[in-house]
Image (cartoon, rainbow, N blue to C red):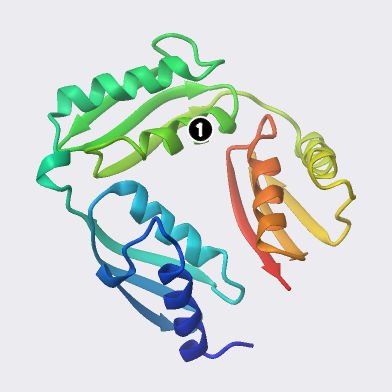
Amino acid sequence: MKSDSQLRREVEEELSNNPAIDANRIGVAVADGIVTLSGHVSDYAQKVAAERSVLRIAGVVAVVAHIDVTVRETDQRTDEDIALSVRAVLDWISGLEEDSIRIKVEQGWVTLSGSVKDGYRSHVAEKHIGHLRGVTGITNNIRISGSASPTDIEHNIRKAIQRHTDREMKHIAVQVEGGNVTLSGQVSTKAERAVVWGAARATPGVKTVVDHLMVG
């Protein structure tokens, strides 16, 4: 088991090696495997990148993000302008019915509400909106209207994993409860972990994915 000091070194190294992150502006504290990030970044995508980078590190139990987004003056936009860009992103995503998602923007913070048939489209929308210039945060209140039995969801996740990795991944446990999926077990690489998570997230009927996979 890694010590908190070792985890902190690995987190700082991971952040420093990610070209999408200004690691000098992010503080790191670790207690009992829980990583707390603090500081200021210039865009929301950078905040998300930092959180996801840390979650990829073996031994990290959870991430607490106290990172504020302070948009550069040259990147600042009106809420109306951001809302138009968000609508353009939603219109671009196939499978989203017109007006199925409602948008609210306040001081750069985007709130999404409405419903979609599966969690994958909700995830895609949030991912692309997070990269829009001027966005300071996202609250995703989109409901998943599609339904499938836990057994069907688990079966489809395992088929998707096998398609993407060319092996059955019997060492991965898939727990499904109300469309919420928890992945646990061990994978060989960070890339494999990302593939497994993506396969689960894209499975119809999945609302959220909790990643407890270990790399090693």
Amino acid on which the number 1 mark rests in the picture: Val
User: Residue at horizontal 75%, vertical 39%?
Assistant: 150
Question: Which residue is pictured at 41% across the width and 61% down the height?
Answer: 50
Q: As rendered, which of 181 and 79 lies closer to the eye?
A: 79
- Which quadrant, please, contains the N terminus? bottom right
Query: Horizontal and vertical percent for residue 207?
Result: 58, 38
Whole-percent x and y of residue 192? Answer: 72, 56
> Looking at the image, which residue is at 35% across and 77% down?
28
**Residue 83, position as x, y percentages in the image:** 24, 23
Q: Nearer the viewer, residue 42 or 181?
A: 42
Residue at left offset 40%, top offset 34%: 141
User: Relative to residue 24, is residue 215 drawn left or right?
Assistant: right
The image shows residue 205 at horizontal and vertical percentages of: 66, 31
Can you see residue 178? no
Please identify the residue farthest to the left as the structure is shown. 73
Using the image, determine if residue 64 lies above or below residue 178. below
Left or right: 203 with respect to 159?
left
- Secondary structure at badge 1 equals helix
The residue at which mark 1 appears reads as 124
